[in-house]
Structure formats: C-alpha cells, structure tokens
Image (cartoon, rainbow, N blue to C red):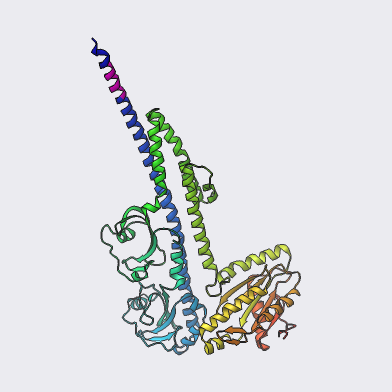
Amino acid sequence: MRPLPGFLYSFKFKISALVIGLLLFAGIGAGGVSLLIAESELRQVIAHQELSLLTGAAAFIDNDLQNKRQQLKALTEEISERGLPQERLQQLLESRESLRDNFFNVNVFDLSGKLVASLRDRNAKRINISGRQYFKDTLSLQEGVISPPFESALSGRPVVVITQPLRDAEGRVTGILLGAIDLLRPSFSAQLDALRAGADGYLFIVTDSGLTVHHPDKSRLLEQGDDGPGTLLEAALRKPDGWQDNVLDDGVPVLLVHKHLREVDWTIAISYPVRSAFATMQSVRLRALLGAALLIACAGVFGWVITKNLLRPLRQLHRHVVAISAGQADIAVFDVSRKDEFGHLSRAFFGLSQRREQAERELHRLATTDVLTGIHNRRMFDALLPQALARAARSGQPLALAILDVDHFKDINDTLGHAAGDQVLIEFARRLSGAVRATDTVARLAGDEFVIVFEQLSSTTEMEMLGRRVIEAMHVPFTLGAAQRAVKTSIGIAVTCAAATTAEELMRAADQALYGVKAAGRDGYAVHQAGAARRQPPELRSAL
C-alpha cells in the first residue's frame, strides 16, 4: 500500500496539469478571440480614415475638372454669341489671362483637324489632330469630352485635354476648342503628392483602361499598367469603391484604398504598406498576449472579463471615430492622457486626424488662392463680398469696393514677354497688400484685374486717402530683370450708401468709376456712390 500516496500524487499532478492546460487553453482562446476582434475593428478604423482623406482628394479633382470644363464652355458660348471668325480667335485667346492659370495650353481646331489658334504660341507648327479619338468623339457626340492621357504633339509633354465644340449662330459645329492639362505641372501633380507628404505609401491615378495619369515616379506616366488577375491595378479597377488589405504591390502586402471619380473615368487610389498602416496593432498584439498569459493563473473566465474591460477603451475609440465622421465631435477627443496601448493608439489617431485636417485646409487654400500671386482668387472674392456686405449692414459702417487694372498691361506682355508680365502681377499684388489696412481684403479676379474690399470705414471720405495710398504705392518703378519700368494703375471705387446695397450694384458702380478714370487718361482713381446717379469724381489723377 506504500505506492498509493505516490500514485495519488501523480494523479493529482495530472489533474492539476489538465486543469492548468484547460485554463491555458481557455485563456489563450479568450485572449486570441479578443485580439482578433480588436484587430478587425482597428483595420476598419484605419481604412476608414484613409478613405475619408482619399474622398476629399477625389472631390477636389472632380471640382477642378468641372470648373475647367465650365470655363471652356463659357468661352465657346462667347465666341458663338459674338460671331467671331476663326482669324480673330488667336487674339481672343491671348486676351484671356485666366486661361494661362488653369491650362497648359488652349488651342482651336477647325472641322478638318487643322490648328487655327494656340494660346502659348501663335506661331506654333500647324498640326492636324483629325486622327485623334477625342477629336472624333467630340464631333460625333457634339459635346465636350475629357481624353485619356497622351503625349502632346506640340509640347512633347504628357497631357490630358478637355474639349468643347464651337458653334455658329445657327448651332452648327464649326470647330473644337481644346484645353490641355500638363500632368507634370506643379499645380496638378505637386498638390496630389503633398497629400502623402511625410507618410509611407503613395497616391496614384489610372484610367479605366489601366493607363497611368498620376504616379510619384513620373517615368510611369502614360504607362499601360498590368491589370491581370491578382494585381494591384486589377483590385483598384474591378472592385467597388472602398479598401482591401490582402493585395500585393510588387510583392509587398499593402492596404489599397480606391475611389472612382465622378467627372471622368479615372480611379484615384492609395497604396499603403500593411506594416506601416497597422503598425500600432503590433503593440496592442504583444500587450494582449502578455495580459492573457498573466490571467491564466486566475481563470479563463476571469481572463475573458479582464480582456473585455481592456477592450472597452477601443470601443470608445471606435465611437469617437464614428462621431467625428458624422460631424458630432472634434478630433480633440483622440488626444487622451492614458499611458497604456489604447492611449498610444488614440494619440496616433489624433495625429492621423490632424494630418487629414491639414490636408483639407491645404485643399481649401489651393482652391481659394491665386496660383501666381499668392493672394485670394475670384472664388474666394465671390464668397467674401456678400459676407462683408452683411457685416457692414449690421454695423452701420460704410463698405467700399475697388476694382483695379494695370495700365497698358498688354503692352508689357507684348514687348517684354509673359514672364515679365507675371513679375509685374506678382509685385503689383505685393504692393497692393502692403498699401491696404489689416481689415481690407485683396484678390485677383483674372489677368491684370484686381479688387480690394474695404471694411470698417469711419466715413465715405476715408476712401480718398486710401485711393491715393494705392496710387502712390505704384509710383516706384518696377524692377524687371536688369531694367526698371514705370507701372501705373487705374482704380474705380464704389462706396455703399445708407440703403441696402447688393454685390451686383457695388460691382457695377466700381466698374463705372474705373471706366471714368480710363477715359480721363488713367493713373488715377475715382469714387462713386453705389446706387446713386453717376457723377464726375473729384480727383481722377494721383498726386505726383
């Protein structure tokens, strides 16, 4: 009977081992299931953040293409209404300075495909584009199209063209107006590259046929990508808008986020290495496994309860993301002081959200800033003027609008070249900004046309002093390379009256004042009262 205690001891040891094994299995199983749930939620949150950023970029490109199409359509309607013959279209293109800001080149072709006018070079070689598919599509559909990217025969650069049919007074198509977008121009490519600045991965754009429109490696532009089964391109083009994390990019697992554009048959996508995209999950995985191992000694069920408690902040983090996406909370909810893994993860989301907000602010700045001069553009002015009029009506203080032209600006372009003309516009905008008060707003409408919105005026007579200050700011000669040139300006100023004044009335009064200054010899200013009968201004020339 002596062996019995040893047997019992062995039996107890086996039972203990079995119990410990069951607890180990239960603890690891509970921890593993909890970890899988956590990783699944994390993947959805991270992918949703990237998709939101990509949606903002897609909306920016769609709006930009739509604005360019509308600009070309407005120009074709003007040509039709004025009944301009083809020999006058070169002069018309050169008179529209805003076309240079939005397009690399604008051309006119007749129905046989021959070049009639070119914005960039009136002496450009006379090419024929009758064989181009976008030319045939425009004539057959009798409406504007956006072409696939191709190499321009005029410049040799990768471009995308937007077309609009030209019509005569009876509505017959007489030619095609074509605006080219340079895919290497900073206003297109640099803005897209900036969205991924400082982050792993890259942003690219492809057509539905797999032709590359944008890529960080500029040598791949116009390249026909491989859209075979299992490729990155096949996943971006054949799957619904959204995200996938089981895609290989040159053998590297990536998070692929993609969205189809509204205005053109392009897909914009982000390829983000999984290792970088889900880097914060590594810390969560390690801590969860250690926690599961420590909880085995207590009990599997107890471990499950603890794991659920650990995952509670993650569910709160997910609720924060949903609330921010719905506009019910600010990203500051991510900036927590917790020292554990969820605190690190929440602060990581805070940094990611800050980057997204910065990108959205940058997109808004690009959309409301004049590319050449760095001041506000027409879009910003159109939104600001009604708001300024409403503020003036509430405060009872007068408001003034000044419209300015650079005197003889066309002569500067014709004699010194467009590069010198650009220097004049940049320096003109700088001097304007320095001559006004901090409460005033300066914007460039198009070409050499600028506006100033004067708010919080103490009286209507204060405009006399402000007008002289702007005129005097331009009297110092402009430095153009090694030479200097006198540059003058004409200013038409309209001041609101006691009665309610609309933006249209204010613009009309300022235009009338400007025409009066030009008729009197330029280099001066005139002040008109909006809504009042037109009068001769008290001073049409600046003091020397």
- Residue 13 lies in the magenta-colored region: yes
**Residue 254 at x, y = what percent?**
35, 55
Q: Residue at x 52, y 67 (%)?
A: 367
Q: Which residue is drawn at 39% across and 48% down?
A: 43
Quarter of the image for the N terminus: give it. Answer: top left
Image check: 432 left or right of 459? left
In the image, residue 173 above or below residue 343: below
Residue 280 vs residue 125, the one in the foreground: 280
Q: Which residue lies furthest to the top in this view?
A: 1
In the image, residue 48 above or below residue 497: above
Image check: 105 left or right of 380? left
Mostly what secondary structure, the magenta segment? helix
The quadrant where residue 480 appears: bottom right
Is residue 419 something that shows in the picture? yes
- Residue 7 lies in the magenta-colored region: no
The quadrant where residue 465 appears: bottom right
**Residue 501 at x, y = what percent?**
68, 70
Q: Residue furthest front?
A: 2
In the image, residue 152 above or below residue 296: below
Quarter of the image for the C terminus: give it. Answer: bottom right
**Residue 215 at x, y = what percent?**
37, 66
Is residue 62 something that shows in the picture? no
Q: What range is drawn magenta here? A: 8-16
How many circles with numbers are drawn on the protein?
0
**Residue 324 at x, y = what percent?**
51, 50
Residue 286 vs residue 369, the one in the foreground: 286
